[in-house]
Image (cartoon, rainbow, N blue to C red):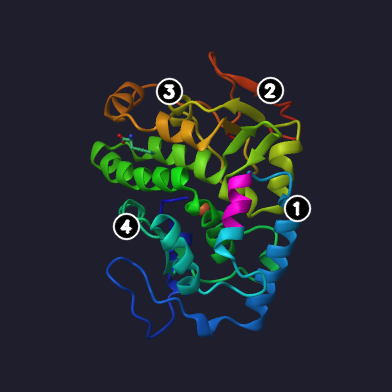
Amino acid sequence: MITMTEKLREQFDAGLLSGQELRDDFTIAQPVHRYTETDHAMWRTLYERQATMLKGRVCNEFLEGLETLGMDKHRVPDFEALNERLMRATGWQVVAVPGLVPDQVFFEHLANRRFPASWWMRKPEQLDYLQEPDCFHDVFGHVPLLINPVFADYMEAYGKGGLKAHGLGALDMLARLYWYTVEFGLMRTPEGLRIYGAGILSSQGESIYSLDAASPNRIGFDVRRIMRTRYRIDTFQKTYFVIDSFEQLFDATGPDFTPLYDALRDQPTLGAGDIAAGDRVIHTGTREGWGDSEDI
Ligand code: PHE
Ligand code: FE
């Protein structure tokens, strides 16, 4: 998520240690000496659990990323060490932030191939769920794909697109695209559906649910459709959008979105669980377990 609510503001402040310099671009030096043994143990537990479970569920590009980066399995990674390999691969780097940063700042970082990652680790009681991105979500979830050249270009283009969308008053539409691709995207491969969205693959429950559950819809990727689709931040997703490749994602988002924003601005949005005319439906969700009162 890329908007700043009060709760997130609180988390941001908590992630900023006293006496620490917050730079103009909202980054800080990663306070590596502040990680406790509990933090490292959390990383180890989560890493082990996800790496094992994701085999056969996550796209190959992600596994290649983990491998190429040589990401630390046992301790919270030192961003500097990570950046050495990442920079060499695609010119991307990870920068430490206290929590979610304002939209404009976030886009500016992406546009310059810097991925802002929360430095702090979730607490043991948040093993399965937390609402704001911690270091495990940001680093394990987002960073491996940044060594894929096409995905790396997509993320930079997204940042530039964000700066533009801001000026056009179209951030809500563009945020949906991020949500349904970078955070909750699935990919169709010859071996079956695979996960590439960071929000899914840093969560054990959703890594299983997104692929195996009958309740959610799975629909072929469509930029225009996604830009109209509301999303839930408090439950597993009601709909997953499925790309065929990162090339498809990059190509479909290449054109200037200005006319698209103009065309969609006054159209009604779709609920998170709706099926619309023209959808390339891969699976129609059974909607089982969805409450009636929810915005779906
Ligand atoms: N093509 C988009 C625009 O003109 C930029 C963009 C690229 C947005 C990739 C999102 C992802 O705004
Ligand atoms: Fe994220």
Amino acid tagged 1: Met
Identity of the residue drawn at 49% across and 26% down: 222
* Label 3, label 2: how far apart the Cα atoms are: 22 Å
Residue 284's disc number = 2
Instruction: Check disc 3 and report the residue beneath it.
Output: 268
Q: Which quadrant of the view contains residue 46?
A: bottom right
Above or below 74: residue 126: above
Instruction: Check disc 4 and report the residue beneath it.
Output: 105
Residue 65 located within the stretch drawn in magenta: yes
Identity of the residue drawn at 59% across and 44% down: 196
Q: Position of residue 174 (x, y in %)?
A: 39, 38
Q: Which quadrant of the view contains residue 83?
A: bottom left
* Label 2, label 1: how far apart the Cα atoms are: 25 Å
Residue 53's disc number = 1
Q: Compare marks 4 and 2 and give the one earlier in the sequence.
A: 4
* Label 3, label 1: how far apart the Cα atoms are: 39 Å
Ligand 1 rendered quadrant = top left
Specify whether tag 2 is near ligand 2 (CB below 8 Å). Answer: no
Say if residue 20 shows up in the picture: yes
Q: Residue 294 vs residue 89: left or right?
A: right
Q: Compare marks 3 and 2 and give the one earlier in the sequence.
A: 3
Of the pair 247 and 121, the residue shown nearer to us:
247
